[in-house]
Structure formats: structure tokens, C-alpha cells
Amino acid sequence: MKEVVRLDVEIVHRIVTVTLEHVAGNRKQFDLVYDDVFSRLDQLIDAGMVAWIRSRPDYFTVMPQRDVDVMELETEIKKRLRV
């Protein structure tokens, strides 16, 4: 199967950014991946790791809770997104 979306997870100061790049396929496929990524990140709020998420059409900004190390959050996001 072709790669539809390329994901990149990186730490920028005290936040984690998750960037989505539309590689192939139609826009509907990209939207489904975007919704899935948002759902997985939203689960981290319920898990007490994330304070808030800001979403844009091609990336997410994720702020960890005060007691969560940003590197720990990056690792957990990569694990959940299988990156």
C-alpha cells in the first residue's frame, strides 16, 4: 500500500509537534488519517499526559502536563502513532 501521509514527531522547546504531510492518495484518505491522529492524541489528555492540543490543517501542537517530561511525551506519541 502506498504511503498516504508522512508523519513527523519532534520536540520544539517545551512542546511536541506532530506534522502531517499529504504524500499520496485523495484528500479523504488524508482527512481520515488526520482524524485518527487527533483521536490518539486526545487519548493522552484522558491519560493525564497532555494539558492541551492545538490542531491545524497539517500539524498538531501538544503541550505536556507539568509533571510529564517532554521527551517522555514524544516517545509515547511515537509509540501510539507507530512512527
Image (spheres, rainbow, N blue to C red):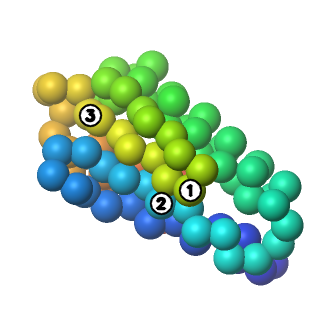
Q: Residue 40's quadrant in the figure?
A: top right
Q: Nearer the viewer, residue 7 or 76?
A: 7
Q: Amino acid at mark 2?
A: Thr
Residue position for label 3: 64
Residue position for label 1: 58
Disc 3 is placed on an element classified as strand
Q: Are marks 2 and 1 in contact (CB under 8 Å)?
A: yes
Residue at point 26%, 34% (across, down): 64
Residue at point 81%, 61% (across, down): 27
The label nearer to you, 2 versus 1, is 1
Residue position for label 2: 19
Q: How many marks?
A: 3
Outermost residue, front direction? 57
Give whichever of discs 3 and 2 has the lower sequence position: 2
Q: Say whether residue 63 is left or right of residue 57.
A: left
Q: Say whether residue 50 is left or right of residue 12.
A: right
Q: Amino acid at mark 1?
A: Asp
| Rendering coords of residue 78 (x, y %) | 42, 56
The label nearer to you, 3 versus 1, is 1
Q: Are marks 3 and 2 in contact (CB under 8 Å)?
A: no
Residue at point 70%, 53% (across, down): 33
User: For the residue carrying disc 3, how many other residues have a C-alpha within 10 Å: few (<14), some (14-19), or many (20+)?
Assistant: many
Q: Which mark is residue 18?
A: none
Residue at point 42%, 24% (across, down): 45
Q: Amino acid at mark 3?
A: Pro
| Rendering coords of residue 29 (x, y %) | 81, 59
| Rendering coords of residue 55 (x, y %) | 51, 40
Relative height, residue 61 to residue 3 (above, below): above
Relative height, residue 54 to residue 74 (above, below): above
Disc 1 is placed on an element classified as loop
